[in-house]
Amino acid sequence: MNSRIYAAIIIAYMGYVSSSHYSDGVGRFSYREDDNRQPARWNYVDTENNEWQNWDALNVDQNECGKESNKQSPIDLTKSSQCKSDHEILFVKGTCEIEDIKFEITPYSLKGTYPRDNFLRGNCTPPALDLSDSFHARYTNTFEMKVPSEHTINGTRYDAEIQFSQVENRAEEHKTNRNNLIAMTSRLLIVDGKRKNDYIETFLQHWEYVAELKEEECNVGKGKTSFFSPKKPISTKKNFLRRNLKKDKTILHAPFRNQYYYGYRGSLTIPPCSDIVLWYVVDKPMKISGSQLARLKDLIMNYRDGHCRKSTYANSDGHVNRPLQPRNDRSVFHCDESDYSN
């Protein structure tokens, strides 16, 4: 290949790398106590163009992180009122498979996003949860992994927490039902021995594949590998995932099937901290291995931005959890088997 053409292609490619959008529009914030953008100062963070503004009905334009009078999350979960739900969490499996999810590593979490609009979905419909408590079935829109857990239960903090957002109502006749609120379902994770959790492993391998792609992308400009003839083909891992991971349309149901939970009114746990969330946190942690937790932390700590710089928001321990917030006399209900009427 002509050397000038080759150089032009490399320059163009590096321009794409350097201009890549590395997170949503929220301004930089930090989990480090020695940073001037630490959690106690999140009320100064620029929250324009945050991802939740994609839903017109959500009131997320103002930074609410510093408001002491509103309903901030996370909190310590202890029961103070009776169950408000009349049935267990119900599921609609949808048609989307694991390959339809957009996996990404952000500076503050490991994330997955289902395609939202019908054009991008094609024939793919996300799974849905019916949480009762005046909610109808809602599509699962995103999920995020936080290390360690943000919520605690009766004073106990767990090793990680995976949070699922449900924003859009599934049925057309319910489109505007409580559409100014986000239903957030969560499962806490605890290390228990060396046995891997197959469910978490599925997500982990996809996030690791994303990290490998980013390393390949960033190494192009350092002369470590050729863009045209990489030492390790980037398709290798993707082919492995396609061969070995189950294409299970019910994969997001696993953390919530036959489980009981706490519920309360709270907020987003990153800026803009809008108090528009109904939280449903499963009361029994899911077990993972120590090596899986280490891999989750490694992915978060080695996050690279659009300029290929390591730019995690985590603190020195690899933690990306917001500190506990005042409960402010909020009611926390708990549902178990005895509460369900059907």
Image (cartoon, rainbow, N blue to C red):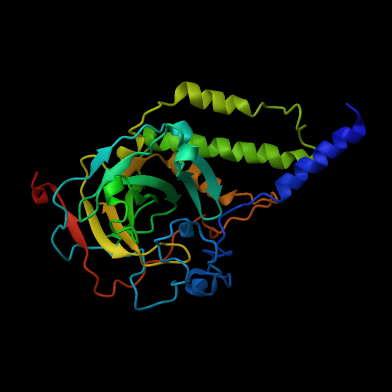
Q: Quadrant of residue 258?
A: top left
Q: How many marks?
A: 0
Q: Quadrant of the C terminus?
A: top left
Q: Quadrant of the N terminus?
A: top right
Q: Is residue 101 visible to the viewer in this orientation of the structure?
A: no
> Position of 228 compared to 279: left or right?
right
Residue visible at 16% across and 58% down in the picture: 84
Q: Nearer the viewer, residue 23 or 133?
A: 133
Residue visible at 42% across and 62% down in the picture: 269
Residue 156 location in percent, x, y?
30, 58
> Position of 294 compared to 21: left or right?
left
Q: Is residue 54 visible to the viewer in this orientation of the structure?
A: yes
Residue 181 location in percent, x, y?
33, 60
Residue visible at 43% across and 63% down in the picture: 322
Residue 30 location in percent, x, y?
54, 64
Q: Nearer the viewer, residue 333 or 183?
A: 183
**Vertical relation: 177 (above or below) 40:** above
Q: Nearer the viewer, residue 166 or 195?
A: 166
Residue visible at 51% across and 74% down in the picture: 41
Q: Quadrant of residue 72?
A: bottom left
> Position of 285 compared to 84: left or right?
right
Q: Residue furthest front?
A: 173
